[in-house]
Amino acid sequence: MKKALLVVAALIVAGIAAFLFSGNPLGHLVKLAIQEFGPKMTQAEVSVGHVAISATDGSGSISGLQLGNPKGFKTAYALKADRIALAVEPSSLTKDVILIHKIELDGPSIIYEKNDGGVTNFDAIQRNVERYLGASGKDKAKDSGEGKKMIIESLVVRNAKVNYNDLMDLGLPDINLRDIGKSQGGVDSSSLAKTIIAELNKQTMQAIAKSVTDSVSAAADSAKNAIKGVFGK
């Protein structure tokens, strides 16, 4: 589930990088870049409703972003975000390292699905991304502008809602990653994805473990009360 957010961030960054590389600061180019590179990277359908970015101050937003699932999964999508807020440093657009002040997802809906083989949809998506960004993928990335490096000062995910394999619905704790790539002087989208996915996976597994623990504890308390009722103590 956390991998979802990582993949979304990677797609956004790829789109921004391609749009910056083109030298034409128009929001629709970011939309086209995400919809072109997204399916190639994830082997899943990627759609975007609208993109608006200011060429003067770098502020903007992406609405209606939906990441589908690769073949072999049944749910309608992996992640859906109604709105993503962006802030890019305009002066960095023509440089080798793009400075992104903020990527903020508020209230994304995530479906975490495990197939009959025990593989999750986000495991499959991440494998596809890593494959794309392998040796041949990196060559493609350089040609398209994806090869640019970037620093993300703040990546925030708030109020995420997660459905885990149709077994439980969870609220994901807010995630706030800072200064991604700063110590390295910038990172490419592959390294960015690995960083974000690791954090997302950790948060998701912790949320699932907590939910299971709370359920077991509630069942135990209910059993104790029932026993007390039988024996009158």
Image: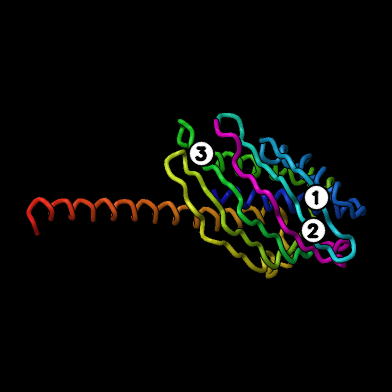
Seen at 87% across and 53% down, the residue is: 21
Q: Work out whether 127 lies above or below 208.
A: above
Query: Which callout, 2 or 3, points at the residue further toward the start of the chain?
Result: 2
Q: Residue 113's mark?
A: 3
> On the picture, is 69 further left or further right than 137?
left
Q: Residue 189's mark?
A: none
Badge 2 marks a residue whose secondary structure is strand
Region in magenta: 74-97
Expressed as whole percent of the image width and height from the top left, the position of residue 174 reads 55, 61
- The CA distance from mark 1 to mark 3 is 28 Å
Q: Disc 1 or disc 3, which is closer to the eye?
A: 1
Seen at 70% across and 41% down, the residue is: 41
User: Residue flagged by tag 2: what amino acid is it?
Assistant: Gly
Query: Which callout, 1 or 3, points at the residue further toward the start of the chain?
Result: 1
Q: Are marks 2 and 1 in contact (CB under 8 Å)?
A: yes
User: Residue flagged by tag 3: what amino acid is it?
Assistant: Glu
